[in-house]
Amino acid sequence: MKFIEEVVVEEFLPTFRSMLAAELRERGLTQHEVAEALGISQSAVSKYAHGEVSRREAVLEDERVVALVERIAEGLSTGDMSRVQALVEAEVLIRRLEEGDLLARLHEAAMPEFAEYDGYGRIHDPDSSLRTREQVRLSVRRALRRLTNASGFAGLIPNVGSNLVECLPDAESVDDVAGVPGRIFDVKGRATVPADPEFGVSEHVASVLLSAREAGSDARAALNLRYDSQIVADLEAAGYDAVEFDPDAPTDPIRESVSARAPDSLSETFVCYQTGSYGIEPITYVLGPDADAVVTAVKALVRE
């Protein structure tokens, strides 16, 4: 993990200072005067002068950086510009270069993980979709840890495997739903999660969640379990409403069944289930406001 501030300190500032030191020396300032002007040691100025500090080519060649270096060097050498003004001018340029510009590109090169997101600048926006997506993945990741640490959960996994999913607030498709790639399986009595949560990897459970939302539910997370009448009874006894649906219904069975129950009258976390049909495994779904709430409901079925 590398912050953009580290890129500024490690890649931009050494190059910028070396350029400025060279310009000031060309204007007749002594090594001591350069050190005073830049607020650095004379040994640092010496290293700049002797090329002992690595410089970033992209910074050296940027016309805006070159122009600012010349302007600041001129101002400092003549006394027309104070050190404070020089710092402010440099800070303004740095902030500009951070916003989808030179420093943003250097940061992207240092953090290739950003490649999957469209628009680097969104990382600095607290309301950005990038931040929201990462928060959803974190929510699923934490809930999975609670779930898989619960003794007995593996026994609730159906033959098709389980998946814990959570969607974005304005989810429209499975690409807006984060889940476990490859699903959660029972491997010798232990719930096994094959990979870190990702978006767009769950077709089945994500579709169930989206159908419930289309019916008017505010649920943003879901988990599928094997069906057993006792499981449904235990969840109802714990205060969760249960909705049965027909897997052979000609239209979307989840959407139709949830709509018929008036979604705003259902408990915040609720259950949808079907008892099976020809070639269809009976399944129980637990839906709730987030992954943690869903796991809390499921943990009532197993011992800690």
Image (cartoon, rainbow, N blue to C red):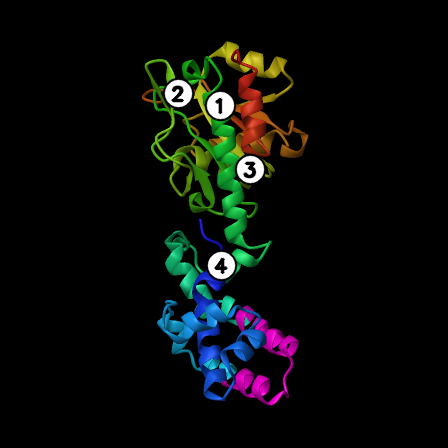
User: For mark 2, what is the residue?
Assistant: 191
Q: Main secondary structure of the magenta part?
A: helix
Q: Residue at x 47, y 68 (%)?
A: 44
CB-based contact (under 8 Å), mark 1 and mark 4: no
Amino acid type, mark 4: Ile
The answer for how far apart the CA atoms under marks 3 and 1 are is 17 Å
Q: In terms of sequence position, does the residue under pointer 2 or pointer 3 come before the other?
A: 2
Q: Where is residue 116 shown, x and y percent of the image?
A: 39, 53
- Which circle marks residue 274 in the picture? none
User: For mark 3, what is the residue?
Assistant: 220
CB-based contact (under 8 Å), mark 1 and mark 2: yes
In the image, 161: left or right of 39?
left
Q: Secondary structure at mark 1?
A: helix
Amino acid type, mark 3: Arg
Q: Where is residue 124 shown, x and y percent of the image?
A: 55, 58
Q: Residues within 10 Å of mark 3 (few under 14, many from 20)?
A: many
In the image, 281: left or right of 129?
left
Q: Which region shows up in magenta?
A: 70-95
Q: Residue at x 50, y 52 (%)?
A: 130
The answer for how far apart the CA atoms under marks 2 and 4 are is 38 Å
The answer for how far apart the CA atoms under marks 1 and 2 are is 9 Å
CB-based contact (under 8 Å), mark 2 and mark 4: no
- Which circle marks residue 4 in the picture? 4
Q: In terms of sequence position, does the residue under pointer 3 or pointer 4 come before the other?
A: 4
Q: Residues within 10 Å of mark 2 (few under 14, many from 20)?
A: many
User: For mark 1, what is the residue?
Assistant: 147
Q: In terms of sequence position, does the residue under pointer 2 or pointer 4 come before the other?
A: 4
